[in-house]
Amino acid sequence: MSHHELAGSSPDVSGPHALPRRRVGALEAVVATPQDAAHSIARFASEYHPDGLHVHLVNAYTVALADKDGEYRKVLSEDALNFPDGKPLSWISKLRRDSPHLHQVRGPQFFLDVMNVGRQFELKHYLLGSTTEVLERIRENLESSYPGVNIVGAESPPFRPLSAEEIEAQDGRVTESGASIVWVGLGTPKQDRESARIAAALPITAIAVGAAFDFAAGTLREAPAWMRACGLEWLFRLSREPRRLWRRYLFGNARFVRSVVLARSSSDVDASR
């Protein structure tokens, strides 16, 4: 399992809500280095807040879905905190010469970084999603890589909509665990909706974490570092799961470009008035 130690002392950030944002298509993403993102979320989650916080790792596919689905766009707007998981989001920000510009915050590494730095804040983590076997492997890998990490709960919900009674029972288990953060790995867009729901129901930080569960468990191979650096991680994933992902990347990427161009054109028109 790959990980890196966060070097140096905690960055001086006032909390995730104070971080600047940049618009990409129909969504706003937060400007933060990977280190700042991990520290700000860990610090926030370690404190009591009467209102929950829902955090999302957004990429080109997310932006494309939000452009098409108004209800989903609303989930990722309002009080959502969106970190730019996809490399193209940071590229666009740099091309526009945003100052400061968006930095990529990769979901799988963000998951590990918060586990790492969260130890100094005594965070309690709850894993929600995937399968029982994957969750057990995640727990074993995390406890081996980050001695002292505190996983207080893990459950694999059924692959169907939950009843109101089941949702209430699930929330009760999360509350009883004393979790600081609930990591939600249910696939996009389901995990984003569930993270928003949890944050609205409980005074807790809920993070939609994408494929990080499979990477952390070792059941899904990560792209080579050079492909990640070049923004070609999507091509690697497509080569591994072509049947499942070809529509996402073919149509999703085209819609992403359209969304970004239209949003830019709209802002140019507004600025000229």
Image: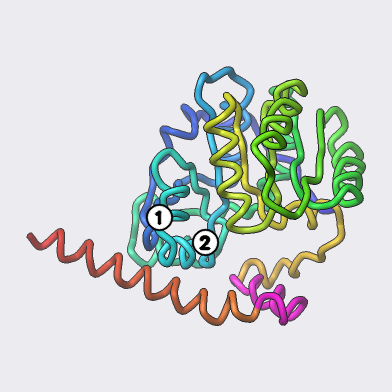
- Can you say whether 11 is above or below 58 in the image? above
Q: Amino acid at mark 1?
A: Leu
Residue at 87% from the left image edge and 32% from the top image edge? 147
x then y, percent, for residue 32: 50, 45
- Callout 1 environment at 10 Å: few (<14), some (14 to 19), or many (20+)? many
Which quadrant of the view contains residue 35?
A: top right
Q: Is residue 152 left or right of residue 184?
A: right
Q: Is residue 135 left or right of residue 11?
A: right
**Quadrant containing the C terminus in the rendered view:** bottom left
Name the dominant secondary structure of the magenta segment: helix
Q: Secondary structure at mark 1?
A: strand
**Location of mark 1 (residue):** 27
Residue at 60% from the left image edge and 35% from the top image edge? 198
Instruction: Pick out the residue farthest to the left.
Output: 273
- Callout 2 environment at 10 Å: few (<14), some (14 to 19), or many (20+)? many
**Location of mark 2 (residue):** 62
x then y, percent, for residue 223: 74, 69
Residue at 46% from the left image edge and 27% from the top image edge? 14
Residue 187 located within the stretch drawn in magenta: no
Magenta range: 231-245
Mark 2 and mark 1 in contact (Cβ < 8 Å)? yes
Q: Amino acid at mark 2?
A: Thr
Q: Secondary structure at mark 2?
A: helix
Residue at 62% from the left image edge and 47% from the top image edge? 208
